[in-house]
Amino acid sequence: MERLKVPRMKELEFGGVLGTAVLILFLPATVVYLLLVCQTEQASLLSLPQTWPTLRSLWSPTDLALVLSWIGLQAGLYMLPMGKVTEGIVLRDKSRLQYRINGSHAMLVTALVVGAGAAAGLRLSYIYDHFLQLAFSATVVSFGLSVFLYLKALLAPETALAPGGNSGNPLYDFFMGHELNPRLGSFDLKFFCELRPGLLGWALINMAMLVKETELRGNPSLAMVLVNGFQLLYVVDALWHEEAVLTTMDIVHDGFGFMLAFGDLTWVPFLYSLQSYFLVTHPQKLSLAMAGGIILLNGLGYSIFRGANSQKNTFRRNPADPKVAGLRTIPTATGRRLLVSGWWGFVRHPNYLGDLIMALAWSLPCGLGHILPYFYVIYFTFLLVHRESRDEHQCLRKYGLAWQEYCRRVPYRIVPYIY
């Protein structure tokens, strides 16, 4: 029997080879620039920092060792026989990979380890003091991992390659990810990096910023507490519902290359924590009324985000579940059905709407005097609009006329009556 081959990618994304080449340089530069700007008194994106770090000042073997130790700790927890083992989606060769779901266990053990370390005198504020060096070290690790992944993919069978990272151009495939599910034995590199080191690192960094603010001013501000609380809820939710990531585009469609490796290990922990980093040097006062309004806004976003995702995941696991059995659907040629009521009859991507509302709530505690803390919500808007267009393209190819009917019945993509 002839083995299935992954066809060459003809429609290149992100501006093709030139665009991905620019992004490989632009993304790390963006991280360094935003962190430098955040350290200045003006914190203005249009005001260049007066002093720029040298490569020698950014390079720290100690901080590289800390980054590798953090990733090693999470890798060790990932391999422990905790939690359940579940199967992913059916692959092109009709096989299904197994995944150990123990993110919530790893989160709890990590919290105990960090708590014990803090009780023993570990200075979490070291993270703030060496933030640029740690970000640079994470970038070095991301590049190193990406090179390893590409070289490994060259030895992988044709059936293991990613549809979106099989263009034949080494630079483009390096960025997009040449292999779909790279593994070392049973250790799935993409699934591990998707949530563990980056999201837990993000929560740890936020906590370090809270500790640093407490050292400087005697107690954490209400704004810092809100940012920590909101983003910790998001991290806990992601790890508690870790199994749901197995049906996302990152796992199902995208290869594991520089785009995801850098995003998981550097971009997420060091830029998603930008609000808490900003608040250390630019404290903001919030009234209780303002704080209450922001809490309600975040609660609204989280309710939409969690409600939409839970509805989708429940329907995928068991369409006969009483929670979703009464929802209207559209049959497709693939045998699957598309939800056309509930959250998914409201807009086509209600989870993205919830994400954007939460992103705004995370930035509002930083006040309205600077645009820098709103980088996350601005960037996330562009990211989700781009991801939504990729989703739409994939769904149209997969479901054809059924998807066109769904779009007719649910005309708004993310924001009702606007987009």
Image (cartoon, grey):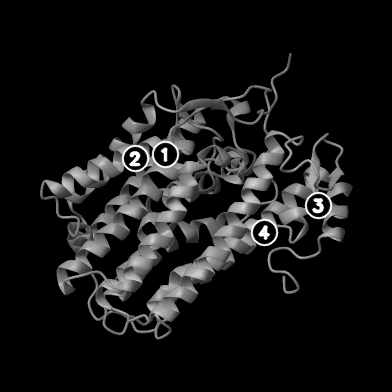
Q: Is residue 390 above or below residue 99?
A: below
Query: Dot 4: few (<14), some (14–19), or many (≥20) neighbours within 10 Å?
Result: many
Q: Is residue 324 above or below residue 3?
A: below
Q: Which residue is mark 3?
A: 340
Mark 1–mark 2 Cα distance, whole angstroms, equals: 6 Å
Q: Position of residue 395 (x, y in %)?
A: 76, 48
Query: Dot 3: few (<14), some (14–19), or many (≥20) neighbours within 10 Å?
Result: many
Q: Earlier in the sequence, mark 3 or mark 4?
A: 3
Q: Earlier in the sequence, mark 4 or mark 1?
A: 1
**Disc 2 element:** helix
Amino acid on which the number 2 mark rests in the picture: Leu
Q: Which residue is mark 1?
A: 104
Q: Are marks 4 and 1 in contact (CB under 8 Å)?
A: no
Q: Which residue is mark 2?
A: 108
Q: Earlier in the sequence, mark 3 or mark 1?
A: 1
Mark 3–mark 2 Cα distance, whole angstroms, equals: 37 Å
Q: Which residue is mark 4?
A: 350
395 on left or right of 21: right
Mark 3–mark 4 Cα distance, whole angstroms, equals: 12 Å
- In the rendered image, the quadrant that contains the C terminus is bottom right
Q: Nearer the viewer, residue 264 or 373?
A: 373
Amino acid on which the number 1 mark rests in the picture: Ser
Query: Dot 1: few (<14), some (14–19), or many (≥20) neighbours within 10 Å?
Result: some
